Image: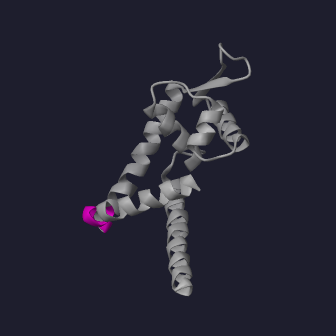
Amino acid sequence: MPEESNALATMLFSELLTADQLLRNKLGRVLPKGMEISHFSVLNYLASTSSERTPAQLAKSFHLTRGAMTNTLGKLERAGYIHIRPDWDDARRKQVAISPAGRSARDGALAGIGPVIEKLVKDLGGDKLRLALPILRDLRLKLEQD
């Protein structure tokens, strides 16, 4: 039985990793020039929240190191997509907010990504996706616990 479990796990993670890579490649081609998926993800997150976040909070939300998040935030700030300001209550911290240019860039990225995602949903079928989502969510939650 352990061999069967190992084979199943290997097939599952092989499919997940390959699908992730293919999706990243496909989406990367339709993002605005110079924008990476990590940039879009942060902009999309900030656009959906109504308050500023610290770099540490963003790193935790994206399951990244603070250094990796700082790198991404630096690129977004240089592009004018976010504002980083000192935290007035704690000088050791910073606060991050999306800028109007960042919101516009995020909207442009969504316009490019939208048709790709819609085609995938159409091709796979909503019923199949609704069946897969709870399994993928459970997998993510389990991985977050560990």
> Could you say which is closer to the camera, residue 135 or residue 83?
135
Q: Residue at x 64, y 46 (%)?
A: 64
Please say whether residue 58 is one of the residues in the magenta stretch: no
The range drawn in magenta is: 124-129
Instruction: Describe the colour scheme in one phrase.
Output: one colour
Q: Position of residue 41 (x, y in %)?
A: 52, 44
Tell me if I can see residue 36 in this picture: no
| Figure quadrant of residue 136 | bottom left
| Figure quadrant of residue 125 | bottom left
Q: Is residue 13 above or below residue 84?
A: below
Furthest residue toward top: 88
Please tell me whether the stretch drawn in magenta is mainly helix, strand or loop.
helix
Furthest residue toward left: 127
Tell me if I can see residue 32 in this picture: yes
Q: Position of residue 39 (x, y in %)?
A: 58, 42
Q: Is residue 55 above or below residue 126?
A: above
Q: Residue at x 55, y 53 (%)?
A: 145
Q: Position of residue 8 (x, y in %)?
A: 50, 79
| Total numbered circles | 0
- Horizontal side of residue 111 vs 102, given as left or right: left
Q: Is residue 111 above or below residue 127?
A: above
Please say whether residue 126 is one of the residues in the magenta stretch: yes
> Could you say which is closer to the camera, residue 8 or residue 127?
8
- Horizontal side of residue 41 vs 84, given as left or right: left
Quadrant where the image shows the C terminus = bottom right
Q: Position of residue 63 (x, y in %)?
A: 60, 47
